[in-house]
Image (cartoon, helix red, strand yellow):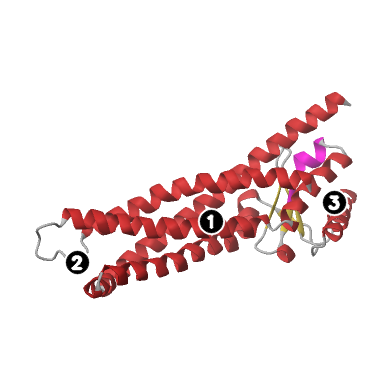
Amino acid sequence: MSIRNNVFGKHHQKIIEEKMNRVLLLIATNLAVIVVLGVVWNILDAMFGISQSLLSMGVPAHFGYVALMALVLGFGGAFISLWLSKGMAKRSMGVQVIDKPTTEQERWLINIVKKQADTAGIQMPEVGIFYSNEPNAFATGARKDHALVAVSQGLLDTMTPDEIEAVLGHEISHVANGDMVTQTLLQGVLNTFVIFIARVVGYLVDTFLSRGEENEGGLGIGYFVTSIVMDIFLGFLASLIVMRFSRSREFHADMG
């Protein structure tokens, strides 16, 4: 029994590592969305001179506008990433959703997930299988009542029914705890700070570089380049916080 428990522990650790890789993919998607939105913002800002007009009203007005836009884009980027997560997971992992069970193994899998979902008080999630020799499983989705739970064929082939049920319980706990939405809210807060701080630093750098020039009140190339660079750098630092949070939620899901 102790040998079997040790094997299960190793499998579980492998599953956690694979899930962290998917979290990293979600974070990378969020960072890409933020950078793209930041570039679009800077282009529109340069075309229509929004910051220029606000700066003529004073620095507080400009920073107030930046804070508002950072809030909108920060949470917008995070929820766009969450909305894309389920489809991305299906495509990247090659998940085959079980619409109508055709084998005894699929029927058993559907029944176990249904039983656990009822116990957790959530709606039945989509259930899928992806073809990998490694034991693996994950849950994703923007809402508790619109989630996906997927397991690898390797997990089904190498683990006992009790062990598979334990892994599925871990994933259902993620859904019931609303971990994806909680992580998205955290990401939205961090995104807001990233966007705001990046543009404050960009403004300070541009002000320093344009000292003594006649158009001192305007924003130059220093602002736009610095803000994008800071978006990437601060976004990376924020991703470390999100990964730390995600790791802690794995222990909560184990408890569940």
Q: Nearer the viewer, mark 3 or mark 2?
A: 2
Give yes or no for residue 155 being in the magenta stretch.
yes
**Bounds of the magenta segment:** 150-158
Rendered image: mark on residue 218: 2
Q: Above or below — where is 160 with respect to 199?
A: above
- 64 left or right, relative to 242: left
Q: Residue at x 9, y 65 (%)?
A: 214
Image position, residue 47 (x, y; %):
26, 72
Residue labelled with disc 3: 109
Q: Position of residue 90 (x, y in %)?
A: 65, 55
Query: Type of residue at label 1?
Result: Gln
Instruction: Give the amino acid at mark 3.
Output: Leu
**Count of labels shown?**
3
Residue 152 shows in this picture:
no
Q: CA distance from mark 3 to mark 2?
A: 62 Å
Q: Main secondary structure of the magenta part?
A: helix
Q: Which of pointers 3 and 1 lies earlier in the amino acid sequence?
A: 3
Q: Which residue is mark 1?
A: 187
Q: Residue furthest top?
A: 3
Categorize mark 3 by other alpha carbons within 10 Å: few (<14), some (14-19), many (20+): many
